[in-house]
Amino acid sequence: MNSFFTLSLGKGIDLISEDERIILKSNFYNLTFSHPKLGLQTALNHLKHSPITLSQLGQIIVETDGIEEREKFDTYLQKFTYFGWICSSVLPLVTAIPMTGDYQFNCLEIEDWQQQSFTLSRFAYLHQVGKEMILEFPQSQAKIIALDWRAAALIAKLSQPQTSATLVEGISDITEELGQQFISLLFATKMLSPEAENSHIMKWEFHDLLFHSRSRKGRHSNPVGATYRFLDKIEPLPVVKPPISDKVIQLYKPDLEDLARTDISLTQALESRRSIREYGENPITIEQLGELLYRCARVKEIIDKEKLGQLSCRPYPGGGAIYELEIYPAINYCEGLEAAIYHYQPDIHQLEFVSNWNPEIEVLFTDAYHACAKQVIPQIMLIITARFGRFFWKYQSMAYAAILKHVGVLYQTFYLVATAMNLAPCALGTGNSDLFAKATGIDYYEESSVGEFMLGTVKH
């Protein structure tokens, strides 16, 4: 830990004095100091209320309690660091805050500042949170708060290689020494670009690494999981999307008992399942579409959870039984259906008309053709959307990642049932959410496409 970093306790750490003892308390840990000596009391109060450097803290301990207490204080400081309680600052510019426990703000000693240049990592990003500007980096377990506009100016300059001297040029009241301390803190939090990326890091794109690190635990301190952050603030969305059209089409319901006797086995479906991008001459029928949707996605049961809203049971698994996914069959060729986009109502097993064939739908099918290596234009494309608010109402941080996992689960369900029905299935790896929004008039941020699945008849 560099001696010029100013140390402090994080905002969420309480310092409580009572009955000849001091208690340090966070959401996860408590530390109690019984009959603390004056130097330790003074040092802890500095960490909480008036941050100072490590050397200054050590000097207080030695002068007040004696040199033998310094080692004991260093042990305490190591424990604070292990708990993720210690923040490091370069004042008046920035404060680095650990987001996980056992994070050490260590950096290499730089011998020749004039000969070495520094660049911000391509994965670092500056963004606003509340009223603060935060610098974060998915490879780091710390975040940096910009305390002054000049910190943002320094960060911007580091988009190009800078020495400590060139970094501070043109920025008022920032000495080269302060610039060196600023670089040291960026170095300690791994925000600076290495001279050469290793072969593993080289393969990552910015958005992929950020999404991966922020949707799983380990490198951030954001709430994760079922936090119910909108409970008593916003009503949960209904378990089934309200009707969007009065033009509806009842779908065929298969006899599940008969299918149980005549279907191929699960093993056979798994072993013979494959993506098929070649169709027969005859189009898929509305009865086949109805059977597939019934077997894959219908609502089997609705469960009322009062304040937590309604849940449901469906043929494919869904986290929290929330089922935020919706299915929009886009019809190119289907016996018994006009070419258009429809919405599947899973509770009453029917289609709602959404939109006539339009230029945007045309492009969606053209995109599907390109996405499957120009082998076939789908007879039917099942466009999967997510009603984000339904899932975001309960879950945090990992919510969008879980939605994509649900898409994968639904893909596999489509594959197995289509294989059992002797249809030609093929999942697509990408789609155009903006085009879907234009084609349907559905708000991009309320409900957007997150997956596409092609269907057709098998060529004999």
Image (tube, rainbow, N blue to C red):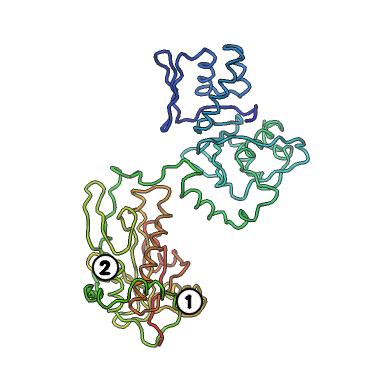
**Vertical relation: 14 (above or below) 377:** above
**Vertical relation: 15 (above or below) 136:** above
Viewer-closest of 261 and 32: 261
**Residue where numbered disc 2 is placed:** 245
The 10 Å Cα crowd at callout 1, few under 14, some 14 to 19, many 20 or more, is some
- The amino acid beneath tag 2 is Ser
* 1 or 2: mark nearer the eye: 1
Mark drawn on residue 383: none
Tag 2's secondary structure? loop
x and y percentages locating residue 117 in the rendered image: 73, 43
Q: Residue at x 33, y 74 (%)?
A: 265
x and y percentages locating residue 366 in the rendered image: 47, 76
x and y percentages locating residue 338 in the rendered image: 32, 80
**Residue where numbered disc 1 is placed:** 369
Viewer-closest of 421 and 87: 421
Rounded to the nearest angstrom, the CA distance separating label 1 from label 2 is 29 Å
Q: Residue at x 36, y 79 (%)?
A: 423
The 10 Å Cα crowd at callout 2, few under 14, some 14 to 19, many 20 or more, is few
